[in-house]
Image (spheres, rainbow, N blue to C red):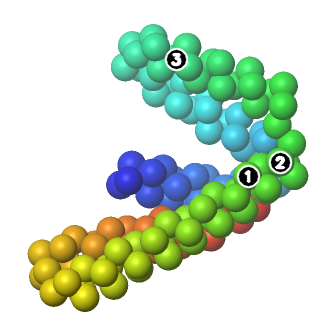
Amino acid sequence: MKYRIALALALISLSTASQAVSLCQEKEQDIQKEITYAQKHNNQSRIDGLNKALKEVRANCTDSKLRADHQKKIAGQKEEIAERKQDLQEAKQKGDADKVTKREHKLQEAQNELKALEARDY
């Protein structure tokens, strides 16, 4: 979960630096950077996977599809938050302080991830 948040924040900072570039071009650049990083660390399986992803982006990417996918991610994250709130409410009703603390933490993580997704400009 922390990795996804860090990745989302990294993508947000990259997007603000390259506003003139299309979303698909930006995605290509991100994958290229990951390939470079994997090459530096001699991670061939990662390189192979990223090259496959790069081919897929080049063949099928459209800005409108990326926007739609992003909106689906936001909707999914909102559903997760609703579930986390329900879990928290149940833990509070049972009076289990340890579970309440854990559920509050998970809810906060989900909310932070939603904020990162919403901050991403599509």
Q: Are marks 3 and 2 in contact (CB under 8 Å)?
A: no
Q: Are marks 2 and 1 in contact (CB under 8 Å)?
A: yes
Image quadrant of residue 43? top left
Q: Nearer the viewer, residue 3 or 33?
A: 3
Q: Are the residues at dot 1 and dot 3 in contact (C-beta closer than 8 Å)?
A: no
Residue position for label 2: 65
* Residue at position x 53%, y 31% in the image: 34
Residue 6 appears left or right of 10: left
Q: Mark 2: few, some, or many residues within 10 Å (few <14, many ≥20)?
A: few
Q: Is residue 17 visible?
A: no
In the image, is 57 to the left or to the right of 53?
right
69 shown above or below 48: below
- Of residues 93 and 82, the one drawn nearer to the viewer in this rendering: 93
Q: Position of residue 38 (x, y in %)?
A: 45, 22
> Mark 3 and mark 2: span between their CA atoms?
25 Å
- In the displayed structure, would residue 119 be above or below residue 89? above
Name the foreground residue: 25 vs 66: 66
In this rendering, the answer to whether 25 lies above or below 10 is: above
Which of the labelled discs sits on residue 103, or is there none? none
Q: CA distance from mark 1 to mark 3?
A: 24 Å
Amino acid at pointer 1: Asp
Q: Amino acid at mark 3?
A: Ile
Mark 3 surroundings: few (<14), some (14-19) or many (≥20) residues within 10 A: many
Which residue was labeled with disc 1? 69
Residue 103 percent location from the top left of the image: 28, 73
The tag earlier along the polypeptide, 1 or 3, is: 3
Element on which disc 2 rests: helix
Q: Nearer the observer, disc 1 or disc 3?
A: 1
Mark 3 lies on residue: 47
Report the residue at 47% width, 20% height from top. Answer: 46
Q: Amino acid at mark 2?
A: Lys
